[in-house]
């Protein structure tokens, strides 16, 4: 069972959360019931027939008969919130047929999907055709890399001083050519460079660092054959061709564990919501993240809330520093009172950054857990400090910063976040000796 | 200059104009860089930068800053807030009416609790926006709240004091709001000490502070304060002088009010007329006496005031004379005096002067007299201003009467009146009486359910404000009984839902102490 904050975190947008709060009166719910596995209720809407709302607690997954396209809709959120507030109002204990049927349907569907997956893996494509197709695409990508290399060499020859004054199209055209060459990763790097040159003071050095790393990537693209296999996969992925799901499953780097959800981050680019769920295996201590996309609103198959634990089997994307993973089965949330991963010193935590970049130099986002971290606002910027006053700069909104500071009271916290190269984006924080997070990054909802 | 910066300088003007300065590095990094062929300088520069950048990122180390976060004192009585309470408070702070926010803070403080830590930034922001909220917020902040406020300049108003304990620290180093709170708390306990502190501060503090401190004397005001107040009549700050003037004008028995009465005395004449009993006549001063200036009587009338100079002098005298003086001089009751004044040539000056005196002297009989009589057309007297001077219970009674009168005359004016009435109630007033609340709820339900109010936009916000002053006994009655299935009531659906939410939130708050 989740807390009210955790439930609200599943809301697809602000207005759903607000509307849900308006439905929190048991009077609006003629039927309310729950078991360990499911919560259900009937909510009186504007129509004559009440909406039937079901939540599969394991996911959690939501189902509602209302016409809303939001997911979960306000009824689903309200039902879960109501349970968190007023368990006594949930009087019905026996599964009504409509609930039982849906749960059964879900199970059948999940089994079928699993079967389908297995049968898919079982039939390999014609290896010769596949190899030819792969070679063709790689050729185009390498062509794109050569173009990019020439473009950068030209810039450096004539000087990059006027880059901040370049029109949008200057960048867009180069990026579009790279996308045409099926190297969208390189195209994305060009757009990042565009952002860097307009980032104000010190942009020259940042831009050069970025171009230098792009150069190393184009170099690597041109000698893919000579690279060891996992690094080869990384270069391919950074250039814009990540492994297919089937390949990931076939590669077989799978691990079953109880995974603690350390943090969830959301980012929106042109209405595309990107969600990263950062996991840490309780037995294996291995780290992983799941990457999901959703257009328009935050709608994902499984809700993950920081601090919860799920039992799941993950398949890792092949990489010299494997982090990204896929779910191979439906995750089951389980109760746990384990707060965070094992405590490490800051030094060893920072060493992991060096190890990661040493293995796969183009990684831009790394999981970082710091214990004994005290937030501080210093010169209008946010940092966390250790006892020696060593400071790690944060990427955090003002609102989040003050809330984190208020919760710390000047005492150290355990914080998990994404390391972004020279800034740290905190996602989840725990007070000492607490298993439930005291703070999570607020999602700026669309 | 580090190697990357030097390469960046080259890249900035271009390798065709300035050949790169290749970095000299020892150890493994130097060996790696030495493998880069430099026949194409652009490519070599980028490759070198790429290697250096990767190493730079991989070897990132924190630097130290010469400042640490101070540690907050623990809040002794802080119990972990139940999730539902946390959610309720969070909802109230996010989009609750100011009055509800004030009530939340009061209830927390009364239950010996402080705001949950995660809500402190939101609460401090609310106090930043609304100064009237601050006195209610400060006692609910706890140590953690004042600690947090000290780290953000925008929240400086909350720094230095804290709970209602009389912390001398708050007086010496607190913000103006904190010091005001300190004086207001000290006055009832030790009026003399508070006065002494104010007197000492008047010699050193700025104009805003002086005016604020003088205002603080209004708590537990007594004749012992009149020396200090009279001295302040010559203060350099106009605000401070006006504050002293107001207080002196409400201090019955003061030398100031006696002087004013003595000036008015020659203007009022009682003549015994044959068959007509005593005839009262009034003749305002004909000339301005220079020494009046010492008591802040102004010779020139303010721009825009629609009366003559003599009337203006009269008005200033009337508002500083005890209302009782009139009753004693004329042996008339307040209502009779008002009727007499209405017929007088100087009615506007008299009525305005009395209304002003009433707001300072708070004489219930006078307010009731005003409210029970027809106020002359075109008069600048405001009924609601008079209403505010009454104790809440009497105020409610008169308000209901005014409301039904206004409603009968012009149905649309009802919500504007209700709105102003609610506005006039201080944030720390108790809820309405059960009777009044009941009458209002039934009245509004009739108007809304019948569809008569469907074009009354203001009523939508007013309903929510009203929900903030309904007594707990009426919560249920107020939340239900709205006919939202009717089309005519649909425009109110959201407001009625908000009312329900506010009442739920208040129910939670009221169970805090239990």
Image (cartoon, coloured by chain):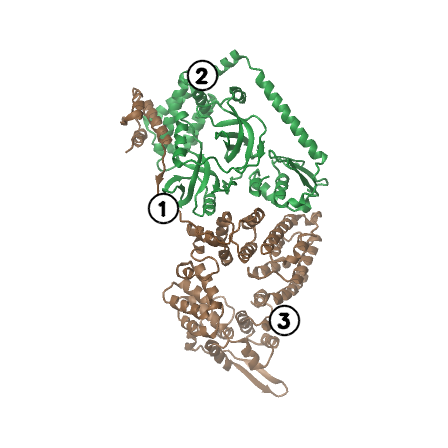
Chain colours: A green, B brown
Closer mark to the observer between disc 2 and disc 3: 2
Front residue (pair A118, B159): A118
Closer mark to the observer between disc 1 and disc 3: 1
Front residue (pair B489, A115): A115
Q: Tell me the subunit letter for badge 2.
A: A
Q: Is residue B9 left or right of residue B317?
A: left
- The image position of residue B421, as x and y in percent, is 59, 61
Do residues under tags 1 and 3 come within 8 Å of each other at their CB atoms? no
Q: Is residue A216 above or below residue A369?
A: above
Disc 2, SS: helix
- The image position of residue A412, as x and y in percent, is 43, 43
Crowding near the residue tagged with mark 2, few <14, some 14–19, many ≥20 C-alpha atoms within 10 Å? some
Location of mark 1 (residue): B67
Location of mark 2 (residue): A139
Say how many tags the image has. Answer: 3
Location of mark 3 (residue): B373
- The image position of residue B345, as x and y in percent, is 56, 76
Do residues under tags 2 and 1 come within 8 Å of each other at their CB atoms? no
Do residues under tags 2 and 3 come within 8 Å of each other at their CB atoms? no
Q: Quadrant of residue B330?
A: bottom right
In the picture, the quarter occupied by the C terminus of chain B is bottom right
In the picture, the quarter occupied by the N terminus of chain B is top left
Q: Tell me the subunit letter for badge 3.
A: B
């Amino acid at each position: 069972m989740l807390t009210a904050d955790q439930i609200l975190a599943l809301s697809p947008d602000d207005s759903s959360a607000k509307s849900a709060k308006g439905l929190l009166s048991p009077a609006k719910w003629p039927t309310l019931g729950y078991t360990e596995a499911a919560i259900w209720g009937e909510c009186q809407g504007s129509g004559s027939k009440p909406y039937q709302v079901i939540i599969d607690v394991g996911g959690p997954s939501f189902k509602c008969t209302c016409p809303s396209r939001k997911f979960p809709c306000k009824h689903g959120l309200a039902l879960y919130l109501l349970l968190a507030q007023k368990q006594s109002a949930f009087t019905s204990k026996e599964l009504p047929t409509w609930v039982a049927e849906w749960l059964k349907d879900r199970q059948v569907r999940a089994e079928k999907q699993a079967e389908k997956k297995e049968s898919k893996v079982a039939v390999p494509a014609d290896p010769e055709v596949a190899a030819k197709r792969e070679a063709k695409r790689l050729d185009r990508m390498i062509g794109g890399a050569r173009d990019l290399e020439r473009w950068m060499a030209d810039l450096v020859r004539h000087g990059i001083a006027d880059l901040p004054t370049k029109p949008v199209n200057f960048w867009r055209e180069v990026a579009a050519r790279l996308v045409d060459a099926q190297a969208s990763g390189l195209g994305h790097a060009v757009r990042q460079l565009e952002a860097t040159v307009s980032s104000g003071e010190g942009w020259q050095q940042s831009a050069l660092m970025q171009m230098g790393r792009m150069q190393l990537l184009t170099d690597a693209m041109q000698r893919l054959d000579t690279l060891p296999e996992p690094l080869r996969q990384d270069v391919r992925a950074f250039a814009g061709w990540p492994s297919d799901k089937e390949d990931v499953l076939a590669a077989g780097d799978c691990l079953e564990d109880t995974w603690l959800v350390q943090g969830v981050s959301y980012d929106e680019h042109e209405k595309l919501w990107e969600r990263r769920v950062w996991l840490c295996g309780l037995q294996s201590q291995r780290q992983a993240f799941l990457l999901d996309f959703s257009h328009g609103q935050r709608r994902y198959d499984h809700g993950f809330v920081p601090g919860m634990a799920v039992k799941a089997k993950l398949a890792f994307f092949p990489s010299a520093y494997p982090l990204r993973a896929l779910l191979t089965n439906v995750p089951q949330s389980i109760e746990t009172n384990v707060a965070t991963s094992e405590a490490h010193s800051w030094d060893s935590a920072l060493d992991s950054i060096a190890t990661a970049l040493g293995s796969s130099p183009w990684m831009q986002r790394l999981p970082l857990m710091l214990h004994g971290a005290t937030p501080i606002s210093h010169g209008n910027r946010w940092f966390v400090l250790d006892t020696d006053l060593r400071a790690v700069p944060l990427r955090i909104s003002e609102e989040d910063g003050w809330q984190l500071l208020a919760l710390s009271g000047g005492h150290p916290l355990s914080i998990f976040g994404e390391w972004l190269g020279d800034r740290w984006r905190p996602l989840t924080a725990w007070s000492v000796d607490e298993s439930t997070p005291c703070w999570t990054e607020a999602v700026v909802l669309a | 200059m580090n190697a990357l910066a030097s390469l960046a300088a080259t890249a900035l003007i271009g390798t065709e104009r300035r050949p790169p300065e290749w970095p000299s590095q020892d150890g493994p990094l130097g060996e790696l860089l030495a493998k880069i062929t430099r026949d194409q300088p652009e490519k070599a520069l980028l490759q070198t930068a790429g290697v250096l950048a990767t190493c730079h990122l991989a070897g990132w180390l924190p630097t130290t800053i010469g400042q640490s976060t101070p540690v907050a004192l623990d809040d002794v009585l802080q119990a972990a807030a139940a999730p539902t309470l946390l959610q309720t408070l969070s909802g109230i702070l996010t989009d609750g009416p100011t009055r509800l926010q004030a009530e939340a803070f009061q209830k927390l403080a009364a239950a010996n609790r402080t705001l949950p830590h995660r809500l402190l930034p939101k609460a401090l922001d609310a106090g930043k926006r609304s100064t009237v909220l601050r006195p209610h917020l400060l006692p609910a902040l706890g140590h953690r709240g004042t600690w947090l406020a000290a780290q953000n300049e925008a929240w400086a108003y909350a720094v230095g004091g804290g709970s209602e304990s009389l912390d001398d620290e708050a007086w010496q180093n607190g913000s103006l709001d904190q010091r005001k709170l300190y004086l207001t708390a000290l006055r009832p306990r030790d009026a003399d000490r508070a006065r002494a502190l104010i007197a000492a501060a008047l010699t050193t503090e700025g104009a805003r502070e002086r005016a604020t401190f003088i205002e603080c004397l209004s708590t537990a005001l007594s004749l012992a304060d009149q020396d200090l107040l009279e001295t302040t009549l010559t203060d350099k700050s106009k605000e401070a002088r006006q504050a002293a003037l107001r207080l002196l004008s409400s201090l019955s028995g003061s030398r100031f009010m006696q002087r004013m009465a003595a000036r008015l005395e020659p203007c009022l004449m009682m003549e015994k007329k044959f068959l007509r009993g005593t005839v009262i006549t009034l003749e305002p001063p004909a000339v301005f006496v220079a020494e009046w200036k010492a008591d802040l009587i102004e010779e020139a009338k303010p721009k825009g005031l629609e009366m003559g100079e003599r009337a203006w002098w009269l008005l200033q005298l009337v508002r500083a004379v005890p209302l009782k003086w009139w009753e004693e001089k004329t042996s008339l009751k307040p209502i009779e005096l008002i009727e007499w004044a209405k017929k007088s040539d100087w009615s506007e000056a008299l009525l305005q002067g009395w209304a002003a005196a009433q707001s300072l002297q708070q004489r219930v009989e006078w307010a009731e007299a005003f409210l029970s009589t027809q106020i002359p057309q075109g008069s600048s007297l405001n009924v609601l201003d008079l209403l505010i001077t009454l104790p809440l219970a009497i105020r409610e009674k008169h308000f209901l009467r005014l409301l039904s009168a206004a409603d009968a005359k012009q149905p649309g004016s009802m919500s504007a009146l209700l709105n102003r009435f609610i506005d006039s109630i201080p944030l720390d007033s108790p809820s309405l009486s059960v009777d009044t609340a009941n009458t209002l709820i039934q009245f509004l339900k009739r108007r809304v359910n019948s569809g008569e109010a469907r074009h009354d936009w203001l009523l939508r916000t007013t309903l929510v404000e009203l929900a903030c002053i309904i007594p707990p006994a009426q919560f249920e009655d107020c939340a239900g009984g709205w006919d939202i299935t009717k089309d005519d009531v649909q425009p109110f659906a959201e407001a009625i839902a908000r009312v329900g939410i506010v009442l739920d939130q208040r129910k939670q708050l009221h169970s805090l102490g239990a």
